[in-house]
Image (spheres, rainbow, N blue to C red):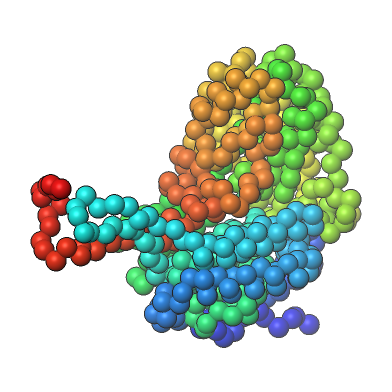
Amino acid sequence: MDPEPYKNFINGEWVEGRSGDVLEDRNPADTRELIGIFQRSGARDVEDAVAAAECAYRSWRLTPAPRRAEILFRAARMLQDRKEELARDMTREMGKVLLESRGDVQEAIDMAYYMAGEGRRLYGQTTPSELPNKFAMSVRMPVGVCGLITPWNFPMAIPSWKILPALVCGNTVVIKPAEDTPLSCYHFVKIVSEAGLPRGVLNLVAGTGPDAGEPLVTHPAVRLVSFTGSTEVGRRVAELCAPVFKHSNLEMGGKNVLMVMEDADLELAVDGAVWGGFGTTGQRCTAASRVIVQKKLYKEFVEMLVERAEALKVGNGLDPNVQVGPLINRDQLNRVQQYVQIGINEGARLMCGGHAIDHGQYACGFFHEATVFSEVSPKMRIAREEIFGPVVSVIPCDDLESAIEIGNGVRYGLSAAIYTRDVNKAFTAMRDMYTGIFYVNASTIGAEIHLPFGGTKDTGNGHREAGTAALDVFSEWKSIYVDYSGRLQRAQIDTFSP
Ligand code: UN1
């Protein structure tokens, strides 16, 4: 018998979608397991949710930020108490190994504590005026109703990156989680609401991008859209927002590079490539899908990487021995297979992996071997396009300058890493890589929540998430001048003589 469907959360109540249509959330490691049934929401559900958020905004924006933050503190503790159970559900619906799901929940906990702390900061500036008896300051004000659209690869962390700064700044929210992983967002929204949010402040509508995401983006009362997902959909969001100058905060693709210099600690660099390339089955925006290795080390590096990749255990993420879970769905698996074929056709050398795994216990999941290509040239599509799967392309290079040139030679600019013991090389790369995130002697994945997260070029549109940078997305500056001179004072015109 099918379970009770999970409902949308609108104006503090759990409600069915208007159409009555539903979506299934299935386990990508074994699609026979139904995780839950969710509402397939449409424009009318979005309208209800936005109306609730608009109404709640009137008093939420006036609630003192430290009071708003107390709710986030409570939510952080509730998430912490339920971490294990939340992580297990995440692995069941998303596939990533349990260790990583715990990390995903932890990232949301970290964000909750951090943004709760911001409730007593939300710093603006006070600065002297150029005129006497005049006071100048800037304060952050909320934007209004925020429409949030989140992906399936970090099903709780990414909603937390958007929801929590939005709330602490005094905005109200409607979130549409990815249709592949609505349960983790459902849990998150439920916990944050139960921590004490007034009705209507946070609303959730489940559904697909076209049915629910697009009406949310185009709704006139939504003042800000924050989206994480593909560059193609991000472009569409930007186009829909542009005519009415709606704020859009876009986090999109990556083709991140790990550069290994000939003086690197080889073992450490291989560790970084394995973790960055195959962690989360390569399904991170920050995944190290390109590894550039200086020629002197190239052969040895590839041999070591291949040996480690071949030894990775692929399977159900709930099994503690498994290191690589399934892809999220059939389309992603097909995409990975297509790219493997593209790599072969382009003349790259397939060193290991390259196949879907679909026998025996794997038959009902979307598994794929950890795959390494060597002899990859920077012009090949596998070296330029985001694959979002367990495929690593190893590219030879002559020196640091050529590594940087190749590294920067893609349309994305999220994360990059260098392995070297030479401080001069490290600092040169740190300066010259045009990415939003850079690592020295650490892999391309593993950003911490109190620093800005995001990228350049086709990765983003100039904003950053997390850290205090998130406050810049979810608030607007208001500069305030208070003239207590009792007379007309003209800036830039009147001069002050003591
Ligand atoms: C993503 O892949 O979209 O830095 C987010 C990292 C994680 C977040 C990744 N903390 O890899």
State left or right for residue 213 relative to residue 285.
left
Work out whether residue 155 can be spotted: no
Residue 111 visible from this viewpoint = yes
- The x, y position of residue 328, in whole percent, is 69, 56
State the residue at coordinates (71%, 30%).
373
Q: Is residue 153 left or right of residue 304?
A: left
User: Toward which corner of the image does residue 260 lie, by quadrant?
Assistant: top right
> In the rendered image of this protein, does residue 382 appear above or below residue 104?
above
Residue 7 to residue 425: above or below? below
Measured as percent of width and height from the top left, residue 411 is found at: 49, 36
Q: Quadrant of residue 300?
A: top right
Looking at the image, which residue is at 39% across and 70% down?
144
User: Looking at the image, is 464 positioned above or below residue 10?
Assistant: above
Judge by depth and name the residue closer to the eye, 417 or 295: 417
Query: Residue 271: x percent and y percent?
Result: 78, 34
Residue drawn at 12 percent across, 47 percent down: 497
In the figure, is residue 47 to the left or right of 230?
Answer: left
Camera-nearest residue between 397 and 169:
169
Position of 357 compared to 413: left or right?
A: right
Q: Residue 299's quadrant in the figure?
A: top right
